[in-house]
Image: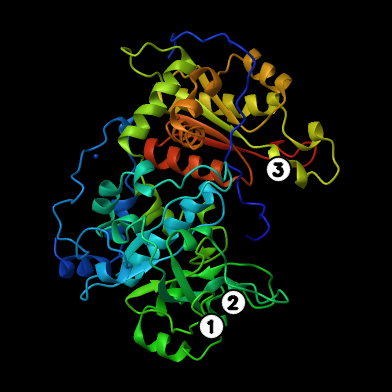
Amino acid sequence: MDTQDPYDDPETPFIPTLGAKPRPTTKGRKLSRRTICTALAGISLLGFGFLLLKPSSYLDTQDVPSYSAASNSPSYLQGPPTQRFRDNLRNDTKYITSFSSAGWTNDVMTYGNLIYLALLTERIPLIAKFLSSHIDSSEPPFAFGEIFDVPRLSQAIGIPVLEWHEVKDSESQVLDDLGGWSVWESVERYKEDPRPRASPIIDRLKLDISWTRTPDWVKLTPPDIIDDHASFWSLATLAFPQARSESLGLPNRPSPQHHVSLPPDDQLLCFDFLYFLGAQRPWEWEMDYSPAWRFVGQHMRWNATMEKLADAHARRAMNVPADEPVPPYISVHIRHGDFRDQCHGLPVDQCFASLSIIARRVSEVQEELRTQKGIEVTHVIMTSDESDPEWWSEVRALGWTWVDYATDRTEEIYGKWYPVFIDAIIQSNGAGFVGTRGSTMSNLALRRVQTWHNGPTRIVQWGWPGADDH
């Protein structure tokens, strides 16, 4: 795997073991293929955009519709999972896939980009499982549909979303040949020996891929700028006959095991890595116009079972009985951990924002909720990878709380993935949110709170003394 980039969030939250902490009181408180394709043709129209941008009211996520797995739509596979993936693909249907290798939050964004590209190319996305590379490599992969509500997502965006384990038997030992496009090899041409982006999930899926380099013109930024982003629409053209045929002569790498050279597959369009994609500029998930967020990401709502589990953890953190409604709270995400590497020798107490600065941002969110929504929010739930006990004692002194995963035995009962998921869900369900500049986990939480709850948000600046002065 490539060296971790600055936007690559390590996903393991710190689990404080400070013993029992004071619990604050509760005071203050959800079609045919021709029809689908016709709908997709209008993806850029303002009417569709208006539908997708409509915000939900606060705590709307408690009302998760229960859709059937089939969503009353025809099957887009031949049947149950098969030993060879191609035996399960329909001859009248085209698909698209890619793979993850950047930590869970970034992998969520990668799959959001993949699904948006599926919309642009009128194909059905195949989503692989999440890998636990940033948590514990011994943890098994986690299915997309076990954390996200796939039927709800499919209904919202108007196309099926399939998972690889529905296509190919997870226990299959058959090695499938496949031709794919390497985006990574093109955007990293500034390196001495650029190669396709590797992902352990490819081996787990028993795929033997022969990669063809994408054309240089897929790069989003000018050639002289060192940046790894590719353009959505440039990649989308490779799904259609003209650009595909004109690009088949580009350098090809034989598959690593069968040593066969294959052209990129037309029925199952395959790209090596889709995290670094944009429509107009790099890092677009940070922008309010982000098409991947507007047309896909905002509809990636939590699986109802996972949301109920996070709700139970939030209740315990705020000492709220199970028979009482969850009071509104402000969620906070402070990432330190590997960000220390970006302090460039500056002492961390001068590099990172102090808790008093973070508290000022929380107060701004509280004031905005008070004046604009008439909500008095006193509960604050902190999520962080900080490991200093004194720092957590200061959090306690502010009257804030956090999920005590050790006391709740969350990892022991459910597994090491769950603190990551629960943190993300709690962050997303805040009436308001305060996050950390440069963290993709904070950025996604900010987008969710703004879009799902119309909540006020703030991002804490850091890196030098006075960075968050305003």
Quadrant occupied by the N terminus? bottom right
Q: Which label was assigned to residue 338? A: 3
Q: Is residue 306 left or right of residue 232?
A: left
The amino acid type found where label 3 is placed reads: Asp
Q: Which of marks 3 and 1 precedes in the sequence?
A: 1
Above or below, 304 against 221 in this view is: above
| 333 with respect to 299 (left or right) | right
Q: Are marks 2 and 1 in contact (CB under 8 Å)?
A: yes
Residue at the image point whose x is 53% and y is 17% from the top = 407
Q: CA distance from mark 2 to mark 1?
A: 7 Å
Label 1 sits on what residue type? Pro
Residue 419 visible (yes or no): yes
State the CA–CA distance, disc 3 to disc 2.
Answer: 28 Å
Numbered tag placed on residue 327 in the rendering: none
Q: Which residue is mark 2?
A: 186
Disc 2, SS: helix
Expressed as whole percent of the image width and height from the top left, the position of residue 229 reads 57, 67
Instruction: Measure the C-alpha gap from mark 1 to mark 3.
Output: 35 Å
Can you give x and y, in whole percent of width and height, for residue 239 in the image?
Answer: 37, 78
Q: Quadrant of residue 338?
A: top right
Q: Which residue is mark 1?
A: 215
Badge 3 crowding class, 10 Å Cα cut-off, few under 14, some 14 to 19, many 20 or more, is few
- Residue at image location 41% in from the left, 75% down from the top: 177
Q: Nearer the viewer, residue 155 or 373?
A: 155
Residue type, mark 2 in image: Ser
Q: How far from the left and from the top, in percent, is residue 216?
A: 57, 81
- 50 vs 397, nearest the viewer: 397
Q: Secondary structure at mark 1?
A: loop
Which is more N-terminal, label 2 or label 3?
2
Q: Earlier in the sequence, mark 2 or mark 1?
A: 2
- Camera-nearest residue between 436 and 177: 177
Looking at the image, residue 53 sits to the left or right of residue 415; the answer is left
